[in-house]
Amino acid sequence: MPQKLIAFFYYALFFFTPLLFNKANSELFELPKMYFVWVITIIIVSLWLVRIIAEKRVIFQRTFLDIPLILYLIFQLISTYFSIDQYTSIWGYYSRLNGGLISTISYLLLYWAYISNLTTQNTLSALKFLLISGLLVALWGIPSHFGYDPNCVLFGYNLTTNCWSTQFVPTERIFSTLGQPNWLANWLVALMPLTWAMFFTSKIKNLKSKIFYLYLSLILIIAIIFTRSSSGFLGLVVALVVFTTPQILHLFKKGKFLVWLTILPILTMSIFFVQKLPKVVNGLKSCTEILTSEGESHINSNITPSSDIRCIVWKGAFDIWRHYPLIGSGPETFAYSYYQFRPAIHNLTSEWDLLYNKAHNEYLNFLANSGLAGLTTYLILIIMAFWLLGSSALRKNPTALPAQAGQRPNALIAWGLLAGFASLLVTNFFGFSVVATQLQFFLYPAMVIGPLGSWDARQSDNQRPNALQVILIFLVLFITIFLLVKIYHYYQADLHYSRAQTLEDNQQYVDSLSEIRKSLNLRPNEPLYKNELSVILSSLSFLTAKTDSDLSAQMTNIAITSSDQALATSPYNLNFLKSRASMFIKLSQPQEAIKTLEYAQKLVPTEPKIAYNLGLTYIQLDQNDQAIQEFKKATQLRPLYRDAWLALGLAQWQKGDKTTARHTLNYILQNIDSQDKEVLEQLKKWK
């Protein structure tokens, strides 16, 4: 019975994870998926333990990947211990969670539970659930290309794409339930070879099955095209080559004319790939130029190509590694460590003020976060997993797939898993893993052990459990319920946090305070909630200062304490430092705001907004000389920083340097916006 339940929950894992999203969460797509994976992992591991207790034996299938996986985990533990932010390294960066130590342990447990409990027939069923999920995800996303996004209907809007901001335009690049075009493309590409494998392994007489997998493949390729993901397309070419190469060689040996039908898709893909080569070459050339001393002239500040931005972020990742060479800055701490070493040229891009919490290259992400040791164990794991998949696919006498006579050898499914795994290695080079693709990365190797493994699951002797077994089973169930309740509380805490943010944005501070307190009651150690509490209380303190000074003072003390606690847990979190500085401004404590901003400036020397805000704070203290110095620093870091130039000109005028002030504002008209109404009106006043 536990085995059947374990299989059922794996089916649910493969089917539901890619489909899950929730508008009510603070992050719509990744957070619900990660919480769901945690829940399923707890249930599966608990059932596994119940089976061990019931059958009175250790049920653990040893595999070729055990040592690489254990080494990988050990160095993740070491990197977490020495992390610059242990809390983030354990739980993961809040808006994603994937990549933290807990998520890593979850994936490893899912791998070992899979190979120890599922049979070959379970694997076939799991693949079908995975592919059906892929079909639904693709069908859900394709209409958005034509202006009809089903997501908007669920969000309470009409069947259009109007529910998304201008930053997310599904008609240009679809993202379905995965949340980002590249994530969708990468996940679908890793599924594509499985559709081919299932097509060829279906019986010739079973025409409906063949037609289903043929149309499934076509639907997935349409969705991939609509993502317009270059990395996804490159991954698809690699997957196609890996999957078809042995088939082509086999047909050549047999002298079959069908070889041309097999080669045709590769030739077609190659034509499209050749068309993209100039773009790739230009991207590499631009990347080289950007990183030279003359690179500034090659940056398009209006809409900077993603390849240029990615190149700059990669340089920052290398700089992090040079500072933390062996074990990195800690898993999932890129959002903090990158800003210590962010190249100043990043300020010239159109995304200069966006937060980057990933290196946009999975391998460099490991190098920065886990150092050379972490990257090495990760690469060893990849090599060993690839060898396992490849050796299984090349096995000369593979066992036949069960349950259906006349099927092709299951080596073809192994080829599909190998090709899908290979595509992930390519797409991860230009991006990073998410929950859905991480499941593929860790469970594709486990799946190949199902179809090709020779072990048989021993059944229980059906004897009635003794008293000790009953006690142990109840203990497992108690721990399971406790952990599930904890996860539920964490999930509810995020819902309250999301509502608190929305209410705060709408200046409904009292209701917002109620919501964030609910979050903290459910998850009292979360620094993000403590930071939000400080933001809300500082606003309330400001509003009540004139009407109730005692209450205002009380809220001020709690706000500062909450900010202190948040930074004590995450001392390198730039957002927390910015919030703290803003808090002190609201609380009429500019000197404390300056201390915070000066500390942030030492921590993040290339961030122009910090210098700009420092300048504004000095203006409040009538310290024009210091303000002018900071405004100049901001404009040096970002020459097109319009607000900094305007503030600099106003400060120069106030100081009495009127000629320089006019030149400063004219710079905005000449180099940034010739129709800037505020600047034009200000210059008229100064005549």
Image (cartoon, grey):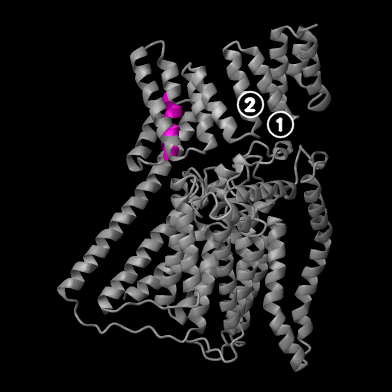
What residue appears at the point 39 percent right and 58 percent down from the top-left corner?
A: 39
Kindly indicate whether the residue at mark 2 contacts the one at mark 1 (C-beta within 8 angstroms).
yes
Crowding at dot 1, Cα within 10 Å, few <14 / some 14-19 / many 20+, comes out as: many
- In this rendered view, identify the residue nearer to me: 78 or 211: 78
Q: Compared to 177, does 299 lie above or below?
A: above
> Which secondary structure dominates the residues rendered in magenta?
helix
Residue 425: percent from left, percent from top? 63, 65
Horizontal side of 516 relative to 183 (left or right) equals left
Q: Which amino acid type corresponds to the residue marked 2 in the rendered image?
A: Ala
Residue 637 is labelled as 1
In this picture, which residue range is highlighted in magenta? 527-537
Horizontal side of 606 relative to 666 (left or right) equals left
Instruction: Say what secondary structure mark 1 lies in.
Output: helix
- In this rendered view, identify the residue nearer to me: 389 or 608: 608
Q: Compared to 202, does 381 lie above or below?
A: above
Residue 533 in magenta stretch: yes
Is residue 631 shown to the viewer in this render? yes
Residue holding disc 2: 611
Q: Compared to 220, does 527 lie above or below?
A: above
Point out the image quarter for the C terminus.
top right
Is residue 675 shown to the viewer in this render? no
Q: Compared to 266, does 275 lie above or below?
A: above
